[in-house]
Every structure is written in structure tokens, then in C-alpha cells.
Amino acid sequence: MQKYLIKDLADYEGKSITLMGWASNKRESKGLVFIVLRDGTGWCQCVVSIDVVGETIFEEARKITLESSLSITGNIVKDERQMGGYELQATAVSLIGASVDYPIAKKEHGIDFLMDKRHLWLRSQRQWAIMKIRNQIIFAIHKFFQGEGFVEMDAPLFTGNACEGTSNLFETDYYGDTAYLSQSGQLYGEAMALSLGKIYTFGPTFRAEKSKTRRHLSEFWMIEPEMAFFDLFENMDLIEKFLRYVTTEVLENCEKELALIGRDTSVLQNIIKPFPRLTYDEAVRIIKGEQDVNGKNAITSLEQELASVQTRINAIKAEIAEREEKLKMPGMKKGEIGFNQAQIDKLKQEAGDAEEQERNIPQWLNSARNFEYGNDFGGSDETVITRLFDVPVMVYNWPHEVKAFYLKRDPDNNRFARGVDVLAPEGYGEIVGGGERETNEALLIEKIKEHQLPMEAFEWYLDLRRYGTVPHAGFGLGLERLVTWICKLPHVRESIPFPRMYGRLLP
Ligand code: 4AD
């Protein structure tokens, strides 16, 4: 049986076809039932008229409930007013699977409820659009690396050694021994790069972080290229080219999806501009307000914003009170009541967002004012700095104590390690971490000891320095962090089909 898809409706204008999908919406008016059918490729309004289908089918169509699965046959006609531009005028409707009391209604649900119903929530338009964008990003990642001559290779997920510190390892039993779920494929990536030159891994990674932030998942997907004969600066060039490519592909191929989720794409368009490259020292001066960015000061701009947020909250609250008073007035028309109620709901949402800013800004200010030179950046520090930029920012040359053991010590100043973090703009923060790798066996052994890692588990890794070492570098991009920024999501949990995070294992 030929399968017809909603995304291809333009090919079937004037023809009769059968669509199969789910009822995402239904309304009735005299002698007509309007069913919005979704099939995973799009949404199509199907009109069932009693005059066309007869009473029996019409009555069945009337009984169709939200998210029932069905097939609908009918003629495809152009209708610019409809989403997708076409409408199906039904001649037959047939139920496949009933859906009784679908739990996600049109009214607003809290985020915990929606996360509990994630298996159903994925059917909604917004989640659909985010998943389509995620898919486009994954496709673009493979296209980019394959086009640049990289070979995709896979790193194991059961590992005998830590890569990114021992504090967030998931431990598991491995035939009586302890194994850890991989925090990063990088160490294996280095071995593979010394075999095939330029490789990338793309797989799940695990971090047992007991933090409920908007940036942390316990299981996330990471893309980790590793390149022989690359230094830190060539690595940064590659990161920039890569992020520009992926973002441009999304802009070119996901216009509809970005519009559906209401993403203002102007910041994404900036991706063509060069990414500022700051040393750690410069970045710290910016966070502490000792250095401006394009005439903007991190501290004073936050102070001003806090004041204006407070003014805004007061104004919104006054308007809500005024509209609520109006609603109490006698003789108000039904339409007027509805309009005022809708305005009040909208204002309450705005007030909620502003109040969140009112809570966040003092925290950001506090961490910026008290930042101590030599520390790694926390989420707040990343927010403070990236709010000043409209393109991703690279921060390199970090104090070696705060970064991973495998990073190369800067030959010009051994206080620093040749690591780089890429911070996404609009307050999003780190999306990429990477750097040039230490090739000196003695320095590496010293670092392994300093980090109190078990030497025997790293013998194979040290071999890579003993048998024909070369300068090499690479990076890791957290897929969900990139999806979150590109879609401008408030939290990373919406960027992956089934998030695993502290406090959540179901569904
Ligand atoms: O900075 P990280 O820890 O770097 C590494 O793992 C290196 N071994 C990568 C390499 O050089 N090959 O992690 C890299 C990226 C982060 O920038 C972030 O995007 C993502 O992985 N990430 C997380 N994403 C979601 N939830 C978490 N808990 C994450 N931790 C890291």
C-alpha cells in the first residue's frame, strides 16, 4: 500500500489520497467536523462533512478523541490559511486505535507533569520541532566531519579509567570487577587519531552529577573529534568552522521548525562573524567588570537590568490589578471578559519570567563580584560573560590546576594548560570543552599522580606517548547543550527525547 505523507501534500493537490496519523485537534460546527491530523511529518486539517460522508461516518468522526489514531481518505485542496497550505476534504474516516482521556490537554501543564508524560509530550508540536532540529544538527555534524576527511570511530562505554575526574563516575559491576560508564571517549579517541589521523566519536556519555541545573544531564551525547598534528589554535579554527557549519545548516533547513518554537534567529545569523578568543586572564577581567565588551560592563549592566526588571514587575502587577478590577464590573460582554482574562494570563506569565530574572541577577552579580582568580568558571560566571556577546566566545589558556590531567602545559607559561572552552551567547554558557594534549610522558605521569588516578589503568594511554607521539588536539561538543542554545530552550531537558538527570529515570 502506498504511504502518503503530510509533508508531500503539494504533490497530491487535486487527488484523493489516504493519510494515516493521529488526531491532534478536533472541533465541530454545524454538519462539519474538523480534525487536525498529524503523521510525524506535519499537520493537516481534514474536513468531514455530513453531506459528503453520510450520517454513519460523520457520527464516528464526531466521536474521535484527542490522539486517537486513524486513517482519513479524501481530496487534497489548496488552502493558504491552513498550516502546511493544504486541506483534506474527507470521503472516509476510519479509526485505528482509540485514545480515551488523553492526559495532555490544551490547558497549561506544569513541567513536572509534562516530564512524567514525556512519552506522550513528544507528540506536541513544539517537541516535534525541537526533535527535528536535533536531527538536523546530528546530520550536519556527520556531514561536516565526513566532508573534512574524518573517520567516525566508536569508543567503548564500559571503561576501566576516569577521563574527566573521579567525582562524577557511574560505577557498575563488570563480571566481578568495577567498570565505569564513559564520561568521554577522548582517551580512546587519541589512540584512534594516532592510527587514522582525524577521527570523531559520537556516543552517549555519563556523568553522575547530583545537580539540578538547567545545563546538566546524567546521560548526554558527545561529539569528540581528535586530530593528529593539530595544536590548540588549529583546534580553535576547526571548532569555529564546525559550529558555523552546523548552525548555518539548521538556519537553512529548519526555518519552519525554528518559527514554530518562536526562536528569534537574528543571534544565530551572527554565526558568520568571527568568534572572539579570550585568554582566561581576559575573561576573568570581563567577569569582574575590569574590562568592558563593546562598551558594556558585566557588573553595571547587570545592576541596570536588575533595576529595570523591578520596575517592569511593578508595572505588570499594576496592569494585572487594573484588569482584574475591570472583570468585576457588571455588564461586561463575554468577548470582553475572555479578552481580559487572556491578557491577565499573558501578564502573569511575563511577571513570572521577570521574577525569575529578579532572583537570578543578584546571584550572577554575587558570583561575578566575588570571582577568585584561578578558579574554574561556574554556570553563573559563564552566564555573566556570555550575556555580553552575540556570538560564541572561546576562552583558552586555563590555570592548569582547574583543568583535566591530559591537557598540554603551555610551553610559554607553564601556569597555564592549553585547554579551550566555547561558551554560547545569550547566557547559555559552555557547549564545547577541548584542547591540545600533553605529549610529555613524564609530565603526564606527574598529573596522573596529582589527580590520584590509578596508574595501571592509564598504562595503555601512556603508550601513546612512548610509541611515536605527535602533537594532537581535539574537543567535545555536548549535543544537548548545542540543541538547547540553538532552540533557545529554558532547560536542557527538552533537548533530548528521554532525559536522564538527577532525580529522574522515568519514563
Ligand atoms: O568539558 P568536558 O567535560 O570535556 C570533555 O569531556 C573532554 N574529554 C572533551 C574532549 O576534549 N574530547 O565536556 C565536553 C562537553 C561540554 O562542553 C558540554 O557541552 C558537555 O560536554 N557536557 C554536558 N552536557 C550535558 N550535561 C552534562 N552534565 C555535561 N557535562 C559536559
Image (tube, grey):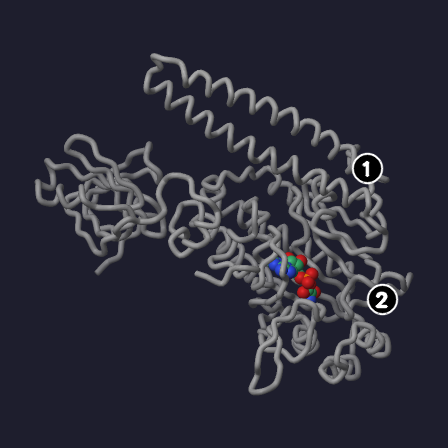
In this rendering, is residue 194 above or below 107? below
- In this figure, which residue is indicated by the disc labeled 2? 409
How far apart are the two marked residues, 1 and 2, measured between alpha carbons? 29 Å
Q: What is the secondary structure assignment of the residue under circle 1?
A: loop
In this rendered view, identify the residue nearer to me: 218 or 201.
218
Which residue lies at the image location 70% right of the left edge and 40% below the top edge?
A: 387
Residue 137 in the image: x percent, y percent? 53, 55
In this rendered view, identify the residue nearer to me: 390 or 400.
400
In this rendering, is residue 425 above or below 309? below
Q: Residue furthest left?
A: 55
* Image quadrant in which the N terminus is located: bottom left
- Could you tell me if residue 4 is visible in this image? yes
Which badge, 1 or 2, is on the more N-terminal residue? Answer: 1
Q: Image check: 322 left or right of 363?
A: left
Q: Amino acid at mark 1?
A: Asp
The disc at residue 424 is: none
- Tell me the crowding category of disc 1: few under 14, some 14 to 19, or many 20 or more residues within 10 angstroms, Cα based: some
Q: Quadrant of ligand 1?
A: bottom right
Specify the quadrant of the image occupied by residue 198: bottom right
Specify the quadrant of the image occupied by residue 426: top right
- In this figure, which residue is indicated by the disc labeled 1? 292
Q: Amino acid at mark 2?
A: Arg
Q: Image check: 194 left or right of 113?
A: right
**How many marks can you see?**
2
Residue 319 in the image: x percent, y percent? 53, 20
